[in-house]
Amino acid sequence: MNLLTNRFSTKRGTFSVGYAADTSARNRDYPGWIYTHYGSNGLGYPLSLEITASDLNAISNSSTIRRLSHTFNARIDYPSEAHPVPSPDGMRVVFQSNWTNRGGNFRGTDAYVIDLRNLLPFNYDFELGTSDFNSTWTVSSSNQVWRSSSAGDGSPYGMRMKSISGGGLVQSTLSNAVSTVGFTNIQVQYAIATFGLTGSHKVYLDWYDGTTWTSAADTVGLLGGWDTRTVNLPAGAAGKSGFKIRFRIDGTSSSEYANIDRVKVIAQ
């Protein structure tokens, strides 16, 4: 899919998918994608009346396009268009539809939500209770890592990781493997805020392929507030039935700590 020309290439040739009616990129925590509604472009245009997500990382060459939903919407003017808008994390899309002019005046619109969260290999926001947290994460010590009611990003709960005075191992590891079999382009996304980190002290993200732990190309030092990180893992993270992640902090004072929330494993 070439986003500059709206032309789609297959083994049978290149053809137009028509022109987009509405486009939104309000998915600030899932950068690199835009959400588009294609209008009624007529026969021969495969994306007519569909909502899609398109990858901007290869805009000048070829781009992945995800077909999310048909709108069944009949348009007569701008207010009657579907107007899809993604949530900040890109995992839900709200749009309107009059269901092919159901009300007879093109104004009988209803709101619909496309929910993509269950398609993620892993999605965790720490809101399901302490027992769920304890069964999901294996921590080095409950005195250093715990589910906290003051560690959430926009919601009450998150994971607090506090360094040990004098230094020592502080980490939190997924208890059960998350299969990436059948997926490609594995990403880990998480929200993080750090406090008191000094010098070279950081928070680290590691990933596990079922045999070996590898440090991801992402370390976080002292931040001024919350930051959402999206980390692209190498090709070796795909196709693994034993895939796991873990977080580590290497501070040497109990005043050095991190809050982590909204942890996702994203894949195609």
Image (cartoon, rainbow, N blue to C red):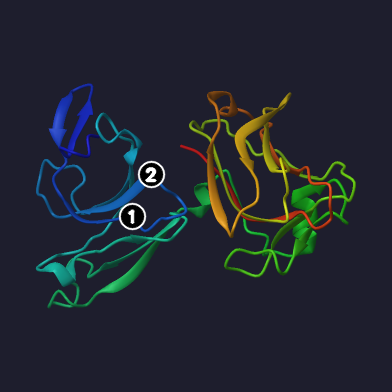
* Rendered location of residue 124, percent (x, y): 63, 54
Do labels 2 and 1 touch, CB within 8 Å? no
Q: Secondary structure at mark 1?
A: loop
Q: Earlier in the sequence, mark 2 or mark 1?
A: 1
Image point (62%, 28%), residue name: 240
Q: Which residue shows up at 73% across the image and 56% down it?
A: 196
In 3D space, how far apart are the residues under numbered discs 2 and 1 (Cα atoms)? 9 Å
Q: Amino acid at mark 1?
A: Ala
Residue 102 in the figure: left or right of residue 170? left
Mark 2: few/some/many CA within 10 Å (<14, 14-19, 20+): few
**Which residue is pictured at 17% across the width and 72% down the height?**
79
Res. 119 mark: none
- At numbered mark 2, what does the secondary structure look like: helix, strand or loop? loop
247 lies above or below 110 = above
Q: Quadrant of the N terminus?
A: top left
Q: Amino acid at mark 2?
A: Gly
Q: Which residue is mark 2?
A: 32
Q: Nearer the viewer, residue 65 or 173?
A: 173
According to the picture, the residue beneath numbered tag 1 turns out to be 25
